[in-house]
Amino acid sequence: MKKNILNILSLISISLLIMGNVQAQQWKIDDDLKDARLKIPYDETNIDAGKLIYEKSCKACHRDIVIVDKNDRDLPSAPNLGNKEFQTNNTDGEIFCKISHGNGAGMPPFESQISEEQRWQVIAFLRSFSDTWEAPDASAAPVADKADEFNGQIKAISTSYDSKNNSIVAKVEAIDSEGNTVYPKGVKVKISIQRGFGNLPICDGEKTDDNGLVSISLNNLPPDTAGFIKVYAQVGDGVVKSEADLKISDGWKWENPLDGHHLWGTRDKTPIWLLITYLTVTISVLLIIGWAFFQLARIYNLRER
Ligand code: HEC
């Protein structure tokens, strides 16, 4: 009987372990990208650029791409991305998400290592191995998405603390095509804050508003003892970034009340009721101690006699 229960328990824990494992290996597909099609022109420049990226970042695991019906390599080794099953069962957007986020197991996330454009370029290269895939209409695809994206040159990003809203404000500065300084709209910003255990991201890809600003509430995040927090901010893939120590409060140093000269240092400022209370208490204590000694002395005398 006991043995049975043990068996059942271990069965349950093993299934939980397996489930956890399966969970960790899932692909995360972003809703807005699920049906997306290649967002850059499918041309030689992009395919060649994608080939270079593939050789540098992917080939070590995925090896040469060979056109086959089904993946001909056993997991856990990386699949042959020229297999027709993969090519027909995945939209460009799904492949983009798989490359960006990885799957928490064999496939690493590339989001922070290769830019968005480079990821699309690799996809263009992968698609060059498919004979069924059709490139989206060059004129139709990218424009809609790029409409509010800034195309000038980003110069700088800076951060400041907005005490009224208790938030961190990041400001992006750029140069437009005519050489004027502008504060562009639609630029993706990342912000994180240094904590004891590493950096805590508080904003991941939020876009700047009409004034080139992104504002992120700090909620109740405590500063360090001196009232500072260290803030890292970057634009897009981190080519332009900044680091700042922002003072967000006066800190929370513990104050010893005796250091504050509350009672002794400035007796003339002490309220009279406090003085009287203080004197009364002190005198009473002294009287009680004196009385106790007096009683002790009496007992001692009595015994002597
Ligand atoms: C460290 C080894 C490694 C590197 C480097 C790597 N991959 Fe992978 N990749 C894998 C493994 C392993 C899998 C299979 C994961 C699984 O199915 O559990 C995979 C799966 C994939 C898939 C999904 C295939 C499918 O059938 O859905 C795509 C797409 C992919 N990789 C693209 C890339 C691209 C593009 C690069 C380079 C930017 C890259 N990988 C770099 C190991 C790697």
Image (cartoon, helix red, strand yellow):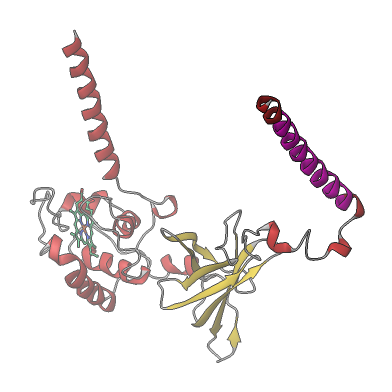
Residue placed farthest to the right in the image?
272
Is residue 261 found left or right of 71 in the rendered image?
right
Which residue is rendered at x = 70% and y = 32% of the image? 296
Of 266 and 305, the residue lying toward us = 305
Magenta: main secondary structure equals: helix
Residue 113: percent from the left, percent from the top? 31, 68
Q: Is 277 in the magenta?
A: yes
Residue 25: percent from the left, percent from the top? 26, 45
Work out whether residue 214 can be spotted: no
Of 123 and 181, the residue lying toward us = 181
Ligand number 1: quarter of image: bottom left
Where is 21 relative to 69, above or below? above
Of 238 and 179, the residue lying toward us = 238
Is residue 13 found left or right of 150 in the rendered image?
left
Which residue is rendered at x = 47% and y = 69% of the image? 143
Q: Is 62 in the magenta?
A: no
Work out whether residue 237 can be spotted: yes
Residue 224: percent from the left, percent from the top? 55, 63
For the N terminus, the quadrant is top left
Bounds of the magenta span? 274-298
Residue 123: percent from the left, percent from the top? 27, 64
Where is 176 relative to 257, above or below? below
